Amino acid sequence: MFRIPCPHCGLRNVSEFRHVGEARTRPDPHTATPEQWRAYLYEQRNVAGWSVESWYHGSGCRQYIGVERHTVTNETRPIARAPESGHAAAGSASPDAGAPDADSAS
Amino acid sequence: MKRRGRPTTYSAGGLVSRGLTHREWPPAWRRHDLQATYDVVVIGAGVHGLATAYYLAANHGIRKVAVVDKGYVGGGGSGRNTAIVRSNYLTPEGVRFYDRSVKLYERLAADLNFNVMFSQRGHLTLAHNDGSLRTMRWRAEVNKLEGVDSQVISPDEIAELVPFMDVSADTRYPILGALYHPPGGTIRHDAVNWGYARAADALGVEIHQNTEVVGIDVEDGRVQGVRTTRGHVSAPVVVNCTAGWASLVSELAGVRLPISTHPLQAAVTEPVKVFLDTVVVSGTLHVYVSQTDRGELVFGASTDPYPSYSMRGSLEFTEELAGHVLELMPSIAKLRVLRQWAGLCDMTPDFSPIMGVTPVAGFLLDVGWGTYGFKAGPVAGEAMAELVATGRTPEIIAAFDLARFQDGRLVGEKGAAAVGH
Ligand SMILES: Cc1cc2nc3c(=O)[nH]c(=O)nc-3n(C[C@H](O)[C@H](O)[C@H](O)COP(=O)(O)OP(=O)(O)OC[C@H]3O[C@@H](n4cnc5c(N)ncnc54)[C@H](O)[C@@H]3O)c2cc1C
Ligand SMILES: [Zn+2]
Protein backbone atom coordinates (compact mmCIF):
# COMPACT_ATOMS: atom_id res chain seq x y z
CA MET A 1 0.00 0.00 0.00
CA PHE A 2 1.39 3.39 -0.90
CA ARG A 3 0.00 6.80 -0.03
CA ILE A 4 -1.09 9.74 -2.09
CA PRO A 5 -0.72 13.36 -1.03
CA CYS A 6 -4.17 14.93 -1.32
CA PRO A 7 -3.97 18.73 -1.30
CA HIS A 8 -7.18 18.80 0.76
CA CYS A 9 -6.79 15.82 3.12
CA GLY A 10 -3.05 15.15 3.37
CA LEU A 11 -1.33 11.79 2.87
CA ARG A 12 -3.95 9.06 2.48
CA ASN A 13 -3.89 5.36 1.50
CA VAL A 14 -4.15 4.73 -2.24
CA SER A 15 -7.19 2.50 -1.59
CA GLU A 16 -9.19 5.69 -0.91
CA PHE A 17 -8.57 6.91 -4.45
CA ARG A 18 -9.53 5.97 -7.98
CA HIS A 19 -6.92 6.34 -10.70
CA VAL A 20 -8.34 8.61 -13.41
CA GLY A 21 -5.55 8.86 -15.94
CA GLU A 22 -2.47 10.60 -17.19
CA ALA A 23 -2.58 14.36 -17.17
CA ARG A 24 -3.17 15.61 -20.67
CA THR A 25 -4.40 18.64 -22.51
CA ARG A 26 -7.81 18.44 -24.09
CA PRO A 27 -7.66 19.82 -27.61
CA ASP A 28 -10.20 22.44 -28.64
CA PRO A 29 -13.15 20.42 -30.02
CA HIS A 30 -13.86 23.14 -32.61
CA THR A 31 -10.44 23.05 -34.19
CA ALA A 32 -9.04 19.60 -33.36
CA THR A 33 -8.49 17.20 -36.25
CA PRO A 34 -9.87 13.66 -35.85
CA GLU A 35 -6.27 12.46 -35.38
CA GLN A 36 -5.67 14.89 -32.53
CA TRP A 37 -8.96 13.96 -30.95
CA ARG A 38 -8.31 10.21 -31.13
CA ALA A 39 -4.80 10.70 -29.81
CA TYR A 40 -6.30 12.60 -26.88
CA LEU A 41 -8.87 9.86 -26.28
CA TYR A 42 -6.65 6.80 -26.54
CA GLU A 43 -2.91 7.38 -26.60
CA GLN A 44 -0.97 6.91 -23.39
CA ARG A 45 2.58 7.92 -22.64
CA ASN A 46 2.71 5.01 -20.22
CA VAL A 47 6.15 6.04 -18.96
CA ALA A 48 8.24 3.94 -16.60
CA GLY A 49 9.19 6.79 -14.28
CA TRP A 50 7.65 9.97 -12.92
CA SER A 51 4.22 10.66 -14.37
CA VAL A 52 1.71 13.43 -13.68
CA GLU A 53 -1.70 11.89 -13.09
CA SER A 54 -5.21 12.70 -12.06
CA TRP A 55 -6.78 10.75 -9.18
CA TYR A 56 -10.26 10.95 -7.64
CA HIS A 57 -10.42 10.97 -3.85
CA GLY A 58 -13.67 9.00 -3.60
CA SER A 59 -13.36 8.02 0.07
CA GLY A 60 -12.20 11.46 1.14
CA CYS A 61 -12.86 14.95 -0.14
CA ARG A 62 -14.36 13.60 -3.39
CA GLN A 63 -12.26 15.97 -5.46
CA TYR A 64 -10.20 15.29 -8.56
CA ILE A 65 -6.59 15.94 -7.67
CA GLY A 66 -3.29 16.00 -9.51
CA VAL A 67 -0.36 14.01 -8.22
CA GLU A 68 3.04 12.95 -9.46
CA ARG A 69 3.80 9.25 -9.15
CA HIS A 70 6.80 7.15 -10.05
CA THR A 71 5.25 4.27 -11.97
CA VAL A 72 8.04 1.82 -11.14
CA THR A 73 8.39 2.42 -7.39
CA ASN A 74 4.95 3.97 -6.73
CA GLU A 75 6.55 6.87 -4.84
CA THR A 76 4.30 9.91 -4.95
CA ARG A 77 4.76 13.65 -4.54
CA PRO A 78 2.44 16.64 -4.79
CA ILE A 79 2.42 18.62 -8.00
CA ALA A 80 2.94 22.34 -7.91
CA ARG A 81 -0.31 23.30 -9.61
CA ALA A 82 -3.71 21.72 -8.98
CA PRO A 83 -5.60 20.59 -12.07
CA GLU A 84 -8.48 22.63 -13.44
CA SER A 85 -11.55 21.05 -11.92
CA GLY A 86 -14.08 21.20 -14.77
CA HIS A 87 -11.79 19.43 -17.13
CA ALA A 88 -10.60 16.83 -14.68
CA ALA A 89 -14.16 15.90 -13.84
CA ALA A 90 -14.65 14.91 -17.45
CA GLY A 91 -12.40 12.00 -16.71
CA SER A 92 -8.99 12.92 -17.88
CA ALA A 93 -6.82 15.01 -15.71
CA SER A 94 -5.15 18.32 -15.50
CA PRO A 95 -4.41 20.70 -18.32
CA ASP A 96 -0.94 21.14 -19.51
CA ALA A 97 0.59 19.20 -16.67
CA GLY A 98 2.92 17.15 -18.84
CA ALA A 99 5.83 19.45 -18.17
CA PRO A 100 7.42 17.91 -15.05
CA ASP A 101 7.85 14.50 -16.65
CA ALA A 102 8.15 15.64 -20.23
CA ASP A 103 11.60 14.16 -20.72
CA SER A 104 11.30 10.96 -18.77
CA ALA A 105 9.98 8.96 -21.70
CA SER A 106 13.09 9.08 -23.85
CA MET B 1 27.61 -24.15 -36.83
CA LYS B 2 23.90 -24.34 -37.48
CA ARG B 3 21.77 -27.33 -36.69
CA ARG B 4 18.84 -27.55 -39.08
CA GLY B 5 15.56 -29.40 -38.83
CA ARG B 6 14.07 -31.09 -35.83
CA PRO B 7 15.73 -30.87 -32.43
CA THR B 8 16.94 -33.96 -30.57
CA THR B 9 13.87 -36.10 -30.11
CA TYR B 10 12.60 -36.64 -26.62
CA SER B 11 11.29 -40.19 -26.30
CA ALA B 12 10.67 -42.86 -23.68
CA GLY B 13 13.68 -44.75 -25.02
CA GLY B 14 15.88 -41.67 -24.73
CA LEU B 15 14.71 -41.09 -21.18
CA VAL B 16 15.60 -44.63 -20.14
CA SER B 17 18.97 -44.58 -21.85
CA ARG B 18 19.98 -41.20 -20.39
CA GLY B 19 18.69 -42.27 -17.02
CA LEU B 20 20.95 -45.32 -17.10
CA THR B 21 24.03 -43.67 -18.60
CA HIS B 22 23.70 -40.29 -16.82
CA ARG B 23 24.59 -38.58 -20.08
CA GLU B 24 23.65 -34.86 -20.06
CA TRP B 25 20.85 -33.67 -22.29
CA PRO B 26 22.08 -31.14 -24.84
CA PRO B 27 21.03 -27.55 -24.05
CA ALA B 28 17.55 -26.85 -25.45
CA TRP B 29 18.84 -23.78 -27.27
CA ARG B 30 22.26 -22.31 -27.94
CA ARG B 31 24.09 -19.08 -27.17
CA HIS B 32 25.44 -16.93 -29.99
CA ASP B 33 27.44 -13.81 -30.65
CA LEU B 34 25.20 -11.05 -31.92
CA GLN B 35 25.57 -10.72 -35.69
CA ALA B 36 25.58 -7.41 -37.55
CA THR B 37 22.48 -8.12 -39.64
CA TYR B 38 19.38 -10.25 -39.52
CA ASP B 39 16.38 -10.55 -41.79
CA VAL B 40 14.09 -10.10 -38.81
CA VAL B 41 14.68 -8.96 -35.23
CA VAL B 42 11.99 -9.97 -32.75
CA ILE B 43 12.05 -8.04 -29.47
CA GLY B 44 10.84 -10.09 -26.51
CA ALA B 45 11.35 -13.81 -25.82
CA GLY B 46 7.91 -14.52 -24.45
CA VAL B 47 5.48 -16.86 -26.14
CA HIS B 48 4.64 -14.23 -28.78
CA GLY B 49 8.21 -13.49 -29.82
CA LEU B 50 9.23 -17.13 -29.78
CA ALA B 51 6.17 -18.33 -31.69
CA THR B 52 6.67 -15.60 -34.30
CA ALA B 53 10.27 -16.68 -34.78
CA TYR B 54 9.35 -20.35 -34.88
CA TYR B 55 6.65 -19.90 -37.54
CA LEU B 56 8.90 -17.60 -39.59
CA ALA B 57 11.39 -20.44 -39.83
CA ALA B 58 8.98 -23.39 -39.92
CA ASN B 59 6.28 -22.04 -42.25
CA HIS B 60 8.21 -19.59 -44.40
CA GLY B 61 11.87 -20.68 -44.32
CA ILE B 62 12.94 -17.29 -42.90
CA ARG B 63 15.70 -18.39 -40.54
CA LYS B 64 18.05 -15.44 -40.19
CA VAL B 65 16.03 -14.28 -37.23
CA ALA B 66 17.17 -13.00 -33.83
CA VAL B 67 14.90 -13.01 -30.79
CA VAL B 68 16.34 -10.57 -28.26
CA ASP B 69 15.23 -10.25 -24.66
CA LYS B 70 16.50 -7.99 -21.91
CA GLY B 71 16.00 -10.82 -19.44
CA TYR B 72 15.45 -14.52 -20.00
CA VAL B 73 13.10 -16.72 -22.02
CA GLY B 74 9.67 -16.57 -20.40
CA GLY B 75 10.71 -13.94 -17.83
CA GLY B 76 7.75 -11.71 -18.71
CA GLY B 77 4.07 -12.52 -18.62
CA SER B 78 4.68 -15.77 -20.47
CA GLY B 79 6.23 -17.32 -17.37
CA ARG B 80 3.88 -15.64 -14.89
CA ASN B 81 0.41 -16.30 -16.21
CA THR B 82 -2.21 -18.69 -14.94
CA ALA B 83 -2.19 -20.55 -18.24
CA ILE B 84 -5.86 -20.52 -19.11
CA VAL B 85 -6.63 -21.32 -22.75
CA ARG B 86 -10.12 -20.80 -24.18
CA SER B 87 -11.92 -19.32 -27.16
CA ASN B 88 -15.36 -18.34 -25.80
CA TYR B 89 -14.96 -14.63 -26.48
CA LEU B 90 -17.65 -12.09 -27.31
CA THR B 91 -16.93 -10.68 -30.77
CA PRO B 92 -16.86 -12.90 -33.89
CA GLU B 93 -13.36 -11.58 -34.70
CA GLY B 94 -12.15 -12.55 -31.23
CA VAL B 95 -13.80 -15.98 -31.24
CA ARG B 96 -12.36 -16.92 -34.64
CA PHE B 97 -8.91 -15.73 -33.64
CA TYR B 98 -8.70 -17.49 -30.27
CA ASP B 99 -10.29 -20.63 -31.69
CA ARG B 100 -7.46 -20.93 -34.22
CA SER B 101 -5.05 -20.74 -31.27
CA VAL B 102 -6.85 -23.53 -29.42
CA LYS B 103 -6.58 -25.65 -32.58
CA LEU B 104 -2.85 -24.96 -32.81
CA TYR B 105 -2.40 -25.73 -29.11
CA GLU B 106 -4.18 -29.06 -29.59
CA ARG B 107 -1.37 -30.29 -31.83
CA LEU B 108 1.49 -28.25 -30.41
CA ALA B 109 3.05 -31.03 -28.35
CA ALA B 110 3.40 -33.12 -31.50
CA ASP B 111 4.58 -30.18 -33.63
CA LEU B 112 7.30 -29.22 -31.15
CA ASN B 113 8.06 -32.67 -29.78
CA PHE B 114 7.67 -31.19 -26.32
CA ASN B 115 5.01 -32.09 -23.78
CA VAL B 116 3.07 -28.86 -23.24
CA MET B 117 0.54 -30.59 -20.96
CA PHE B 118 -2.52 -29.04 -22.61
CA SER B 119 -5.46 -30.11 -20.48
CA GLN B 120 -8.86 -29.32 -22.00
CA ARG B 121 -10.66 -29.80 -18.73
CA GLY B 122 -13.54 -27.39 -19.33
CA HIS B 123 -13.96 -23.73 -18.42
CA LEU B 124 -16.86 -22.21 -16.44
CA THR B 125 -17.68 -18.52 -16.19
CA LEU B 126 -20.21 -17.94 -13.42
CA ALA B 127 -23.08 -15.49 -13.61
CA HIS B 128 -24.26 -13.93 -10.34
CA ASN B 129 -26.75 -11.47 -11.79
CA ASP B 130 -29.11 -11.03 -14.72
CA GLY B 131 -26.70 -8.76 -16.54
CA SER B 132 -23.92 -11.32 -16.67
CA LEU B 133 -26.33 -14.12 -17.51
CA ARG B 134 -27.49 -12.07 -20.49
CA THR B 135 -23.89 -11.50 -21.66
CA MET B 136 -23.26 -15.22 -21.33
CA ARG B 137 -26.25 -16.13 -23.48
CA TRP B 138 -24.97 -13.65 -26.03
CA ARG B 139 -21.46 -15.12 -25.87
CA ALA B 140 -22.80 -18.67 -26.18
CA GLU B 141 -24.72 -17.73 -29.35
CA VAL B 142 -21.73 -15.96 -30.93
CA ASN B 143 -19.54 -18.93 -30.00
CA LYS B 144 -21.94 -21.48 -31.50
CA LEU B 145 -22.19 -19.49 -34.74
CA GLU B 146 -18.41 -19.68 -35.01
CA GLY B 147 -18.47 -23.42 -34.31
CA VAL B 148 -17.10 -23.16 -30.78
CA ASP B 149 -18.49 -25.50 -28.09
CA SER B 150 -20.08 -23.18 -25.52
CA GLN B 151 -23.39 -23.20 -23.65
CA VAL B 152 -25.18 -21.72 -20.64
CA ILE B 153 -25.77 -24.24 -17.84
CA SER B 154 -27.82 -24.19 -14.63
CA PRO B 155 -26.64 -24.18 -10.98
CA ASP B 156 -27.47 -27.90 -10.66
CA GLU B 157 -25.28 -28.72 -13.61
CA ILE B 158 -22.54 -26.53 -12.13
CA ALA B 159 -22.75 -28.40 -8.82
CA GLU B 160 -22.19 -31.65 -10.66
CA LEU B 161 -19.10 -30.34 -12.45
CA VAL B 162 -17.65 -28.53 -9.41
CA PRO B 163 -18.49 -30.46 -6.26
CA PHE B 164 -17.04 -28.00 -3.73
CA MET B 165 -18.80 -24.92 -4.99
CA ASP B 166 -21.49 -23.20 -2.99
CA VAL B 167 -24.41 -22.97 -5.43
CA SER B 168 -27.04 -22.37 -2.74
CA ALA B 169 -29.39 -19.41 -3.09
CA ASP B 170 -28.61 -17.85 0.31
CA THR B 171 -25.13 -16.56 -0.45
CA ARG B 172 -24.25 -12.91 -0.94
CA TYR B 173 -23.83 -13.43 -4.68
CA PRO B 174 -25.97 -16.48 -5.59
CA ILE B 175 -24.89 -18.32 -8.72
CA LEU B 176 -27.58 -18.10 -11.40
CA GLY B 177 -25.83 -20.07 -14.11
CA ALA B 178 -22.58 -20.36 -16.00
CA LEU B 179 -21.13 -20.21 -19.47
CA TYR B 180 -19.64 -23.68 -19.95
CA HIS B 181 -16.86 -24.09 -22.50
CA PRO B 182 -15.68 -27.73 -22.61
CA PRO B 183 -12.59 -27.23 -24.86
CA GLY B 184 -11.16 -24.55 -22.54
CA GLY B 185 -8.54 -25.50 -19.98
CA THR B 186 -4.97 -24.97 -18.88
CA ILE B 187 -1.53 -25.60 -20.29
CA ARG B 188 2.01 -25.74 -18.94
CA HIS B 189 3.14 -22.23 -19.87
CA ASP B 190 6.89 -22.81 -19.34
CA ALA B 191 6.75 -25.86 -21.56
CA VAL B 192 5.15 -23.83 -24.34
CA ASN B 193 7.87 -21.16 -24.11
CA TRP B 194 10.69 -23.68 -23.92
CA GLY B 195 9.18 -25.85 -26.65
CA TYR B 196 8.95 -22.92 -29.07
CA ALA B 197 12.45 -21.72 -28.14
CA ARG B 198 13.94 -25.15 -28.68
CA ALA B 199 12.15 -25.78 -31.97
CA ALA B 200 13.01 -22.31 -33.30
CA ASP B 201 16.64 -22.79 -32.31
CA ALA B 202 16.75 -26.09 -34.18
CA LEU B 203 15.55 -24.29 -37.32
CA GLY B 204 18.38 -21.76 -37.09
CA VAL B 205 16.74 -18.93 -35.15
CA GLU B 206 19.08 -17.23 -32.66
CA ILE B 207 17.80 -16.53 -29.16
CA HIS B 208 19.68 -13.78 -27.36
CA GLN B 209 18.91 -13.47 -23.66
CA ASN B 210 20.25 -10.57 -21.55
CA THR B 211 20.14 -8.36 -24.63
CA GLU B 212 18.12 -5.21 -24.09
CA VAL B 213 16.95 -3.03 -26.95
CA VAL B 214 17.82 0.55 -26.06
CA GLY B 215 17.18 2.23 -29.42
CA ILE B 216 15.41 1.67 -32.71
CA ASP B 217 16.84 3.33 -35.81
CA VAL B 218 14.34 4.81 -38.21
CA GLU B 219 15.25 6.65 -41.41
CA ASP B 220 12.79 8.15 -43.90
CA GLY B 221 9.94 6.39 -42.12
CA ARG B 222 11.61 2.95 -42.39
CA VAL B 223 13.09 0.89 -39.63
CA GLN B 224 16.83 0.26 -40.08
CA GLY B 225 17.70 -1.84 -37.07
CA VAL B 226 18.02 -1.84 -33.32
CA ARG B 227 20.63 -0.77 -30.80
CA THR B 228 21.10 -3.23 -27.98
CA THR B 229 23.22 -3.45 -24.86
CA ARG B 230 25.38 -5.93 -26.82
CA GLY B 231 25.77 -3.88 -29.96
CA HIS B 232 24.05 -2.59 -33.03
CA VAL B 233 22.05 -4.84 -35.33
CA SER B 234 20.58 -3.88 -38.67
CA ALA B 235 17.38 -5.47 -39.91
CA PRO B 236 14.65 -4.47 -42.34
CA VAL B 237 11.94 -5.87 -40.08
CA VAL B 238 11.61 -5.41 -36.32
CA VAL B 239 8.70 -6.98 -34.42
CA ASN B 240 7.72 -5.61 -31.02
CA CYS B 241 6.58 -8.50 -28.79
CA THR B 242 7.24 -6.90 -25.42
CA ALA B 243 3.76 -6.93 -23.83
CA GLY B 244 3.95 -4.90 -20.58
CA TRP B 245 6.93 -2.93 -21.91
CA ALA B 246 5.41 -2.42 -25.37
CA SER B 247 4.89 1.34 -24.98
CA LEU B 248 8.51 1.91 -23.99
CA VAL B 249 9.85 -0.09 -26.93
CA SER B 250 7.44 1.50 -29.42
CA GLU B 251 8.38 4.94 -28.17
CA LEU B 252 11.96 4.15 -29.29
CA ALA B 253 10.60 4.00 -32.84
CA GLY B 254 8.41 7.06 -32.28
CA VAL B 255 5.14 5.12 -32.28
CA ARG B 256 2.78 6.00 -29.42
CA LEU B 257 0.31 3.33 -28.34
CA PRO B 258 -3.11 3.33 -26.67
CA ILE B 259 -1.75 1.07 -23.94
CA SER B 260 -1.31 1.38 -20.22
CA THR B 261 0.64 -1.14 -18.20
CA HIS B 262 -1.06 -2.67 -15.17
CA PRO B 263 0.28 -5.28 -12.76
CA LEU B 264 -1.73 -8.48 -12.51
CA GLN B 265 -1.27 -10.72 -9.50
CA ALA B 266 -1.86 -14.40 -8.90
CA ALA B 267 -1.31 -16.88 -6.09
CA VAL B 268 -1.14 -20.62 -5.43
CA THR B 269 -1.96 -22.65 -2.34
CA GLU B 270 -0.14 -25.61 -0.89
CA PRO B 271 -0.92 -28.79 -2.84
CA VAL B 272 -3.89 -30.94 -1.87
CA LYS B 273 -5.47 -34.02 -3.38
CA VAL B 274 -6.98 -33.18 -6.76
CA PHE B 275 -10.68 -32.33 -6.46
CA LEU B 276 -11.20 -29.60 -9.05
CA ASP B 277 -10.94 -30.61 -12.68
CA THR B 278 -12.38 -27.52 -14.35
CA VAL B 279 -11.42 -23.85 -14.48
CA VAL B 280 -13.92 -21.63 -12.61
CA VAL B 281 -14.17 -17.89 -13.18
CA SER B 282 -16.39 -15.35 -11.44
CA GLY B 283 -16.39 -11.88 -12.90
CA THR B 284 -18.57 -10.49 -10.13
CA LEU B 285 -16.25 -11.78 -7.41
CA HIS B 286 -13.14 -10.85 -9.41
CA VAL B 287 -11.60 -14.26 -9.02
CA TYR B 288 -10.83 -17.49 -10.83
CA VAL B 289 -9.58 -20.89 -9.67
CA SER B 290 -8.02 -23.97 -11.20
CA GLN B 291 -5.99 -26.85 -9.78
CA THR B 292 -2.61 -27.94 -11.10
CA ASP B 293 -1.59 -31.54 -11.62
CA ARG B 294 0.54 -31.19 -8.49
CA GLY B 295 -2.59 -30.25 -6.54
CA GLU B 296 -1.97 -26.55 -5.92
CA LEU B 297 -4.96 -24.29 -6.35
CA VAL B 298 -4.13 -21.43 -8.71
CA PHE B 299 -5.98 -18.17 -8.04
CA GLY B 300 -6.15 -15.11 -10.21
CA ALA B 301 -8.09 -11.87 -10.24
CA SER B 302 -8.40 -8.64 -12.18
CA THR B 303 -5.50 -6.22 -12.58
CA ASP B 304 -4.32 -3.80 -9.93
CA PRO B 305 -6.53 -0.70 -10.18
CA TYR B 306 -3.82 1.70 -11.41
CA PRO B 307 -1.06 1.43 -14.00
CA SER B 308 2.40 0.55 -12.76
CA TYR B 309 5.61 -1.20 -13.79
CA SER B 310 6.05 -2.63 -10.30
CA MET B 311 6.02 -6.41 -10.12
CA ARG B 312 5.57 -6.66 -6.35
CA GLY B 313 2.73 -8.58 -4.81
CA SER B 314 0.53 -6.79 -2.27
CA LEU B 315 -1.28 -7.79 0.90
CA GLU B 316 -4.47 -6.03 -0.24
CA PHE B 317 -4.59 -8.39 -3.17
CA THR B 318 -4.23 -11.56 -1.08
CA GLU B 319 -6.81 -10.41 1.46
CA GLU B 320 -9.39 -9.55 -1.16
CA LEU B 321 -8.68 -12.67 -3.14
CA ALA B 322 -9.03 -14.94 -0.12
CA GLY B 323 -12.34 -13.33 0.79
CA HIS B 324 -13.76 -13.87 -2.67
CA VAL B 325 -12.45 -17.40 -3.07
CA LEU B 326 -14.10 -18.40 0.20
CA GLU B 327 -17.44 -17.07 -0.95
CA LEU B 328 -17.23 -19.55 -3.80
CA MET B 329 -15.62 -22.45 -1.97
CA PRO B 330 -16.07 -22.08 1.79
CA SER B 331 -14.64 -25.53 2.49
CA ILE B 332 -11.08 -24.62 1.49
CA ALA B 333 -10.70 -22.05 4.29
CA LYS B 334 -7.87 -24.01 5.94
CA LEU B 335 -5.64 -24.05 2.86
CA ARG B 336 -2.50 -21.93 3.07
CA VAL B 337 -1.23 -19.66 0.31
CA LEU B 338 2.16 -20.93 -0.83
CA ARG B 339 3.29 -18.02 -2.96
CA GLN B 340 2.07 -15.00 -4.85
CA TRP B 341 3.53 -13.02 -7.72
CA ALA B 342 2.79 -10.33 -10.29
CA GLY B 343 3.36 -9.71 -13.98
CA LEU B 344 2.84 -6.73 -16.26
CA CYS B 345 -0.15 -6.48 -18.57
CA ASP B 346 -0.39 -4.16 -21.59
CA MET B 347 -4.04 -3.09 -21.37
CA THR B 348 -5.84 -1.66 -24.41
CA PRO B 349 -9.08 0.36 -24.31
CA ASP B 350 -11.11 -2.45 -25.94
CA PHE B 351 -9.45 -5.51 -24.34
CA SER B 352 -8.27 -6.64 -27.77
CA PRO B 353 -4.68 -6.88 -29.01
CA ILE B 354 -2.85 -4.55 -31.39
CA MET B 355 -1.22 -6.42 -34.26
CA GLY B 356 0.29 -5.53 -37.59
CA VAL B 357 1.81 -2.54 -39.30
CA THR B 358 2.59 0.90 -37.86
CA PRO B 359 3.31 4.28 -39.47
CA VAL B 360 7.00 3.21 -39.42
CA ALA B 361 7.57 0.78 -42.30
CA GLY B 362 9.08 -2.51 -41.15
CA PHE B 363 8.25 -1.87 -37.49
CA LEU B 364 5.50 -4.32 -36.59
CA LEU B 365 3.42 -4.74 -33.45
CA ASP B 366 2.24 -7.85 -31.65
CA VAL B 367 1.17 -6.25 -28.38
CA GLY B 368 -1.82 -5.29 -26.27
CA TRP B 369 -2.07 -8.77 -24.79
CA GLY B 370 -3.35 -7.53 -21.49
CA THR B 371 -4.38 -10.30 -19.14
CA TYR B 372 -5.36 -12.76 -21.87
CA GLY B 373 -2.44 -13.11 -24.29
CA PHE B 374 -0.86 -16.41 -23.43
CA LYS B 375 -3.58 -18.38 -25.12
CA ALA B 376 -3.01 -16.34 -28.30
CA GLY B 377 0.70 -17.15 -28.65
CA PRO B 378 0.38 -19.74 -31.44
CA VAL B 379 -2.14 -17.92 -33.63
CA ALA B 380 -0.39 -14.58 -33.17
CA GLY B 381 2.97 -16.09 -34.03
CA GLU B 382 1.54 -17.79 -37.09
CA ALA B 383 -0.16 -14.60 -38.31
CA MET B 384 2.79 -12.30 -37.60
CA ALA B 385 5.12 -14.68 -39.45
CA GLU B 386 2.76 -14.63 -42.43
CA LEU B 387 2.65 -10.83 -42.34
CA VAL B 388 6.45 -10.62 -42.34
CA ALA B 389 6.82 -13.21 -45.09
CA THR B 390 4.12 -11.96 -47.46
CA GLY B 391 3.90 -8.28 -46.55
CA ARG B 392 0.13 -8.66 -46.33
CA THR B 393 -1.94 -8.56 -43.13
CA PRO B 394 -3.67 -11.94 -42.71
CA GLU B 395 -7.46 -11.79 -42.51
CA ILE B 396 -7.54 -13.35 -39.04
CA ILE B 397 -5.76 -10.35 -37.46
CA ALA B 398 -7.08 -7.60 -39.72
CA ALA B 399 -9.54 -6.31 -37.10
CA PHE B 400 -6.77 -5.82 -34.53
CA ASP B 401 -4.74 -3.17 -36.36
CA LEU B 402 -3.42 -0.03 -34.69
CA ALA B 403 -5.41 2.14 -37.08
CA ARG B 404 -8.69 0.99 -35.54
CA PHE B 405 -8.28 3.61 -32.84
CA GLN B 406 -8.04 6.31 -35.51
CA ASP B 407 -10.98 4.93 -37.45
CA GLY B 408 -13.19 4.18 -34.47
CA ARG B 409 -13.38 0.40 -35.10
CA LEU B 410 -12.82 -0.89 -31.58
CA VAL B 411 -13.24 -4.62 -30.96
CA GLY B 412 -14.93 -4.61 -27.55
CA GLU B 413 -13.95 -7.73 -25.62
CA LYS B 414 -14.27 -6.32 -22.11
CA GLY B 415 -17.31 -8.48 -21.42
CA ALA B 416 -15.29 -11.61 -22.10
CA ALA B 417 -11.81 -10.71 -20.92
CA ALA B 418 -11.88 -8.38 -17.91
CA VAL B 419 -11.52 -11.06 -15.24
CA GLY B 420 -11.48 -14.40 -17.01
CA HIS B 421 -8.12 -14.33 -18.73
C1 LIG C 1 -0.71 -13.16 -13.28
C2 LIG C 1 -1.04 -13.27 -14.74
C3 LIG C 1 -2.00 -14.18 -15.16
C4 LIG C 1 -2.31 -14.32 -16.52
N1 LIG C 1 -3.19 -15.28 -16.89
C5 LIG C 1 -3.40 -15.54 -18.20
C6 LIG C 1 -4.21 -16.64 -18.58
O1 LIG C 1 -4.72 -17.37 -17.74
N2 LIG C 1 -4.40 -16.85 -19.91
C7 LIG C 1 -3.83 -16.04 -20.86
O2 LIG C 1 -4.05 -16.29 -22.04
N3 LIG C 1 -3.06 -14.99 -20.52
C8 LIG C 1 -2.81 -14.72 -19.21
N4 LIG C 1 -2.01 -13.67 -18.84
C9 LIG C 1 -1.46 -12.78 -19.87
C10 LIG C 1 -0.24 -13.38 -20.55
O3 LIG C 1 0.69 -13.79 -19.58
C11 LIG C 1 0.43 -12.37 -21.47
O4 LIG C 1 -0.52 -11.70 -22.27
C12 LIG C 1 1.42 -13.04 -22.41
O5 LIG C 1 2.27 -13.91 -21.70
C13 LIG C 1 2.21 -12.03 -23.18
O6 LIG C 1 3.23 -12.70 -23.88
P1 LIG C 1 4.30 -11.92 -24.69
O7 LIG C 1 5.20 -12.93 -25.31
O8 LIG C 1 3.64 -10.95 -25.58
O9 LIG C 1 5.07 -11.02 -23.61
P2 LIG C 1 5.98 -11.41 -22.34
O10 LIG C 1 5.95 -12.84 -22.04
O11 LIG C 1 5.64 -10.46 -21.26
O12 LIG C 1 7.42 -11.11 -22.89
C14 LIG C 1 7.86 -9.81 -23.17
C15 LIG C 1 9.37 -9.85 -23.10
O13 LIG C 1 9.88 -8.63 -23.60
C16 LIG C 1 11.09 -8.39 -22.93
N5 LIG C 1 11.47 -6.99 -23.08
C17 LIG C 1 10.83 -5.90 -22.59
N6 LIG C 1 11.47 -4.78 -22.93
C18 LIG C 1 12.55 -5.16 -23.67
C19 LIG C 1 13.61 -4.45 -24.31
N7 LIG C 1 13.71 -3.11 -24.27
N8 LIG C 1 14.55 -5.17 -24.97
C20 LIG C 1 14.48 -6.52 -25.03
N9 LIG C 1 13.51 -7.24 -24.43
C21 LIG C 1 12.55 -6.56 -23.76
C22 LIG C 1 10.80 -8.79 -21.49
O14 LIG C 1 11.98 -9.10 -20.79
C23 LIG C 1 9.88 -10.01 -21.68
O15 LIG C 1 10.57 -11.24 -21.56
C24 LIG C 1 -1.68 -13.49 -17.49
C25 LIG C 1 -0.73 -12.56 -17.07
C26 LIG C 1 -0.39 -12.45 -15.73
C27 LIG C 1 0.65 -11.44 -15.32
ZN1 LIG D 1 -8.91 14.49 -0.45
Image (tube, coloured by chain):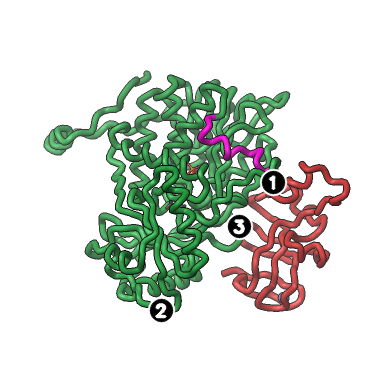
Chain colours: A red, B green
Q: Which residues are magenta?
A: B394-405
Q: Name the residue that disc number 2 marks.
A: B171
Residue A34: percent from left, percent from top? 78, 43
Crowdedness near tag 2: few (<14), some (14–19) or many (≥20) residues, C-alpha within 10 Å = few
Chain label for disc 1: A
| Mark in the foreground, 2 or 1 | 2
Residue located at (24% from left, 61% from top): B274
In this figure, which residue is indicated by the disc labeled 3?
B307
Q: What residue is shown with label 1?
A: A105
Subunit ID for the residue under disc 3: B
Q: Earlier in the sequence, mark 3 or mark 2?
A: 2
Please state the horizontal and vertical placement of residue B79, each as a whole percent of the image.
Answer: 41, 48
The residue depicted at 77 percent of the width and 47 percent of the height is A37
In the image, residue B188 sits, relative to residue A75, either above or below, namely: above
Residue type, mark 2 in image:
Thr
Instruction: Work out which quarter of the rendered image holds the N terminus of chain A and state it.
Output: bottom right
Residue B326 visible (yes or no):
yes
Q: Indicate the chain on which mark 2 is placed.
A: B
Q: Residue B365 in magenta?
A: no
Q: How far, Cα to Cα, is label 3 from label 2? A: 33 Å
Under mark 1, the amino acid is: Ala
Q: Residues within 10 Å of mark 3 (few under 14, many from 20)?
A: many
How far apart marks 3 and 1 lie (CA) works out to 15 Å
Front-lying residue, B147 or B278? B147
Relative side of B52 to A35, left or right:
left
Expressed as whole percent of the image width and height from the top left, the position of residue B398 reads 57, 35
